[in-house]
């Protein structure tokens, strides 16, 4: 899928949202930004300096079906509507309206639809483990949590952490 086709899909997504009676923000940058993200399919970000929203799509998501990409674009456009920056009840109502009208399957996360992104090629170099509950924290990069483990606690039970790898 080329960049021009992706930008056309964004314009279509915005129009479909409007045709459903939902009012997206009137200033959405018409060009989709591609980013090699492995942790998200899409991202909607308000650019305060230009008073516009920018929609970013993971370049890896383009390997998924076109319908999945369109659902992600609509998901992000719905975040530009008033009072729907998170997945609040109003956002969920808008999603239900879009799903009903166009037969989409938009959800909070596309991974629930079976679409996937490739995992990072980096291998886990460090593992920290809670001495109390056994929870393991795997890290690919050295950080203060690795070098100064004694200063950190388990996020589940607040137990002490030790480096095991």
Image (cartoon, rainbow, N blue to C red):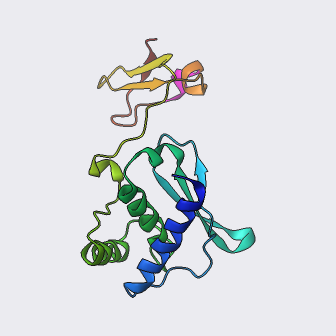
The residue sitting at 39% across, 47% down in the picture is 64
> Residue extending furthest bottom?
21
Q: Position of residue 157 (x, y in %)?
A: 33, 34
Tell me: 115 left or right of 160: left
What range is drawn magenta here?
Answer: 148-152
Q: Is residue 146 above or below residue 157?
A: above
Q: Is residue 5 above or below residue 111?
A: below
Tell me: 4 left or right of 77: right
Q: Is residue 154 above or below residue 66?
A: above
From the viewer's side, name the closer residue of 138 and 149.
138
Q: Position of residue 110 (x, y in %)?
A: 35, 52
Q: Is residue 159 magenta?
A: no
Q: Position of residue 96 (x, y in %)?
A: 27, 74
Tell me: 38 left or right of 66: right
The residue sitting at 45% across, 31% down in the picture is 153
Report whether residue 44 is seen.
no
């Amino acid at each position: 899928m080329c960049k021009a086709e992706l930008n056309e899909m964004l314009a279509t997504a915005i129009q479909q949202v409007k045709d459903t009676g939902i009012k997206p923000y009137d200033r959405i940058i018409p060009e989709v930004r591609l980013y090699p993200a492995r942790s998200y399919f899409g991202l909607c970000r308000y650019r305060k300096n230009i008073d516009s929203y920018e929609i970013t799509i993971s370049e890896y998501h383009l390997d998924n079906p076109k319908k999945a990409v369109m659902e992600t674009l609509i998901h992000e456009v719905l975040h530009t509507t008033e009072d729907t920056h998170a997945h609040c009840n109003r956002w969920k109502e808008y999603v239900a309206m879009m799903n009903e009208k166009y037969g989409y399957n938009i959800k909070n996360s596309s991974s629930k639809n079976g679409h996937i992104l490739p995992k990072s090629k980096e291998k886990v170099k460090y593992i920290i483990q809670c001495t109390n509950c056994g929870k393991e924290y795997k890290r690919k990069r050295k950080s203060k949590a690795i070098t100064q483990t004694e200063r950190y606690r388990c996020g589940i039970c607040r137990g002490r952490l030790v480096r095991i790898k």
